[in-house]
Amino acid sequence: MLFASLNIPGVAAGTVKKRDREAGKAIESVAKKSCTEALDEEIKMNDGKVEIRVAADAGWQTRSSGRKYNSYSGHSSLIGDKSGKIVRYDYRCRKCRLCENAKRKGIQPIDHDCRKNWDGSAKAMEPDMIVGMLKDLEKDHIHPHELVMDDDSTTISRARKECEQSITKFSDRNHLKKTFSNKLYDLQRFKKYRQLRGKTMTHLKKCFSYVLAQNQKKPEELKKSLLCIIPHMYGDHLACPSWCKYKRNPASYLPQNLPYSRYLTCPELKKDLEAIIQTYAQQADKLSDLGSTQACESFNHIVASKNPKSLFLSGSESTSFRIAAAVAQKNIGKSYIQEVNDELNMSPGAYTEKAVEKMDRKRKLQKIRQSSAEYKKRRCQIRKSSSQDQGCKEVREGKTYETSVGLEKMDEEQDINSIPSATVEPERIPLRNTDSTFVYFDLETTGLGSSAEILEIGAARGQDIFQKYIKPNGTISANATCVTGLHMKNHELYYRDQKLATTDLKSALQKFSEWLSDSNSNILVSHNGLRFDFPLFIQNITSQNIVMNTCIAGFIDTLEVF
């Protein structure tokens, strides 16, 4: 298509396939050579010892939903722990187009490079490939005595039975976190707990990951920390280890990573979460020494870029060539192209060398940048911000896409109205005006949610005090009454047993604006204001069309100070 768009005669498909086979065999030769060099490098980095630690994983050439595995081909790799390079790789294929076409026609297949080497199921490919690679290393007198992999297959049982040397298996921390996340999502999907939403699950996964990372090689501490996660989220900090911020400052501690900065309260949810955590705590000895197959996942990503799962290429040797190209790129970099040219007795040319050098340089710089703490922190911030933004939009829009949502009601009865977009969150910038007046400010409300109504506006500027009570339109929650002492009685607002003089919301805000106007450049100071008081205040003055830009210079949250 490229040639046709440039009005240049194209190359016949048969010619392309011939050149593909020539180059493919050269690529496979380079890939095998790179594995041999990677093994030598691994042993050298291991102080010359042949007892090495390797990570193993497999990939398939068909997209899977997690319930159905029917790929015609798969690949696997062993990656050295020290070098991070592939020391062995293998490939299984259970289909050959030429053989099947000849069988269907009842004739002998033509002489060809048949890559069909498997008659079993797709699931059984992974154990067979990994055990085969381990036995191949043993033939070269290399002892892979430690194997890092996921817990999704029976590979280790087969390896211990068929390999001559003993092998110690280590679980993969990334697959472990993924399994934990899946259990949380299954619990939310089947039990429909209101408190088990995005923010709660994010905090649970974060705590689980943190506990695993901080207690490697310490099984007793790991078990104790795992069992403390759920009580910690329910406000029970008696057994919490040193990482618990409540123990540092109990008076001002708030569970800010939980919804509305409030502890979980559902007893049924607590029981189910503790059951999940208990299964991991019982395996503390095993989980206190984890490995990583991240390098294998990186290799699988390279394979997917060269052999897209949306295309069927397993019927010929094409998939095998593409896997070999991924191996060479993983071990050598883009400069493997030059080695393929050397293998074919071809000169790569100045433009090829320049392009390869540029790509390898970019790859190294990107690797350095992505391994920095600043990059990882920024990536977490972007992910968190994106998740919050997506969640807010879905809440405002209501149900727009969901399985069988069109069958729940008649089309004309569907609620297609959206909540208007919220006011853009103010940008946080340092305050530089030293002549500002500090106004200590607090709100009392009907509840702790973003939809709570303001009951009282209180502020102090030196000896000058402002206080207005507001009669709410809705009810006051029991928790709010317990904290503030404010409650409704006979449609009147009371503080304990004292009846209060009230006004409407707009009048109170206007009076507050007039009071602030007596002083220039006011800065409102509040405790936990950034998360609650300030957004609620801005939301209400916006809804009442009251402008305070001229009398408020900024906000300060003392929670970040104390």
Image: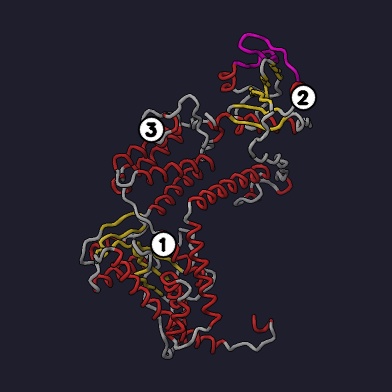
Q: Mark 3 and 1 residues: CB-CB less than 8 Å, in contact?
A: no
Q: Mark 2 and 1 residues: CB-CB less than 8 Å, in contact?
A: no
| Residue at which label 2 appears | 517
Q: In the picture provided, is 158 more to the left or to the right than 180?
A: left
| Residue at which label 1 appears | 295
Answer whether residue 491 is magenta in the image. yes
Q: Secondary structure at mark 3?
A: loop
Q: Residue at x 24, y 63 (%)?
A: 51
**Mark 2 Cα-neighbour bin, 10 Å: few <14, some 14–19, many ≥20:** some
Task: Give me the C-alpha separation between circle 2 and circle 1.
Answer: 62 Å
**Mark 3 Cα-neighbour bin, 10 Å: few <14, some 14–19, many ≥20:** some
| Residue at which label 3 appears | 240
The x, y position of residue 443, in whole percent, is: 65, 24
Q: Secondary structure at mark 1?
A: helix
Answer whether residue 30 is magenta in the image. no
Q: Secondary structure at mark 2?
A: loop
The mark nearer the N terminus, 2 or 1, is 1
Which region of the structure is painted magenta? 485-506
Q: Residue at x 66, y 16 (%)?
A: 488
The mark nearer the N terminus, 3 or 1, is 3
The x, y position of residue 495, in whole percent, is: 63, 13
Quarter residue 115 falls in: bottom left
Amino acid beneath label 2: Ser
